[in-house]
Image (cartoon, grey):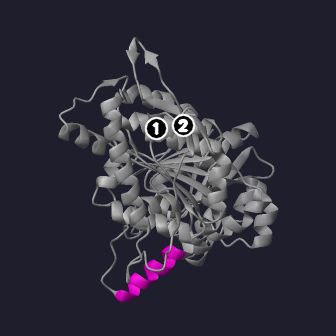
Amino acid sequence: MSPSPEDRDAATQGLSATPRPTGAGSYPIDSGSFMHDYVNWLRHASPYINSHRERTFVVMLPGEGVAHPNFGNIVHDLVLLHSLGVRLVLVHGSRPQIEARLSARGLTPHFHRDLRITDAQTLECVIDAVGHLRVAIEARLSMDLAASPMQGARLRVSSGNYVTARPIGVLDGVDYHHTGEVRRIDRKGIGRQLDERNIVLLSPLGYSPTGEIFNLACEDVAMRAAIDLAADKLILFGAEHGLLDESGKLIRELRPQQVPAHLQRLGSNYQAELLDAAAHACRAGVKRSHIVSYAEDGALLTELFTRDGGGTLVDQEQFEQLREASIKDVGGLIDLITPLEEQGILVRRSREVLEREIEQFSLVERDGLIIACAALYPIADSDAGELACLAVNPDYRHGGRGDELLERIEERARAAGLKTLFVLTTRTAHWFRERGFEPSGVERLPAARASLYNFQRNSKIFEKTL
């Protein structure tokens, strides 16, 4: 994503908008454009390809996802992950398949606290549904069709008694019978299979040391597997794109400590179950949990191989942060501002100048990419400073990052005892006027800065009292 002038948030940037990249699965008719987009996507995906190699991902797909028409595409995407060196543990659910079997036998399902009560007759339906699903999934992962993503895959799938369970017992006077909870995951056994490049398939059944069989929640199996295996990611498929806010807008990122408020808002539903499992896994040491849609083609790849993803990320660490720059950021700053310099929008700064002035910069970093920056230069022999080099990557122009950087620069200026903040701009005067800057002139600049004013650029000057 090559940065270019940001329409509102930069001190000296252009006003024209840059078209966003073509969406997943949608390509221009022009074959040259198609190839350019493909090559560009692959280049930007390469850091993720490298970082995901030899990492352990636990992927949970509910029974609704297995039954959905998009299931075949999900299988192809899992095969692609495996081919790129990802160590995969796939956990499947079976709720709708169990319901279908209960209905066929004329049995009424019973729940308490959103958990199925598994009596002896229900257990027979559970075993039947899970067994059929496991065989069906193994068959799909064993396909080797010519001219398809499965060609030459030759996957080996390992499934078995990797989950030890115990009964839930009696709650509120209700006997859950054969409904259980995870007691232990066979970490060493699964690890050996992953070391041999096998995909491990876990079903929502657990076994006790006494030979009993228990019906488990697939979310619980996936969460415990991710924790016990010290997985790098827990990926949870749901019907929605991810977690949605009150207006139906996707929430792209959350810290675990932010989750309780959303759980309270959601109440008791499946989305809350997914979010709770994601947060619990992160609190227990899983670095990142993702919630993505099983109904959207390519949702898994979009989430894993693009910087913004396509679902909801629950992350232990801050995914995007506003901080002060350090010497290691020089390369990223050059990548951000060079296109603006080449267009004559920003004054050129050599690497040596940036290295010397790096402490003047504040920046916004998103998952390792510097997407915005601004600098504060105190003006000698005065109580004024200059806001300079405010730039935002065009792919992130509407997230309020310019305002965040302006606020940070003003905070730094006040902390340094400065009373006035000047800015010189050729393209975005209105943006600064809207944020309290007043028109000014060269005669208002402190002498040390006025002597450096470039009359050929004819920049407009604004000032703000702090």
Say if the magenta span includes residue 126.
no
| Residue 296, image x, y percentages | 33, 58
Say which residue appears at 76% left-offset and 72% top-offset: 351
Mark 2 lies on residue: 279
Front residue of 193 and 312: 193
Q: Residues within 10 Å of mark 1 (few under 14, many from 20)?
A: many
Q: Residue 100 carries which label?
A: none
Front residue of 82 and 349: 82
Chief secondary structure of the magenta span? Answer: helix
Numbered range of the magenta stretch: 31-42
Q: Name which quarter of the figure residue 35 lies in.
A: bottom left
Front residue of 7 and 67: 67
Q: Residue 275 carries which label?
A: 1
Extreme top residue here? 173
* Quarter containing the C terminus: top right
Say which residue appears at 58% left-offset and 45% top-offset: 226
Q: Is mark 2 on a helix, strand or loop?
A: helix
Q: Is mark 1 on a helix, strand or loop?
A: helix
Q: Distance between the residues labelled 1 and 2?
A: 6 Å
Query: Does the rendering let one see residue 222?
Result: yes
| Residue 414, image x, y percentages | 70, 38
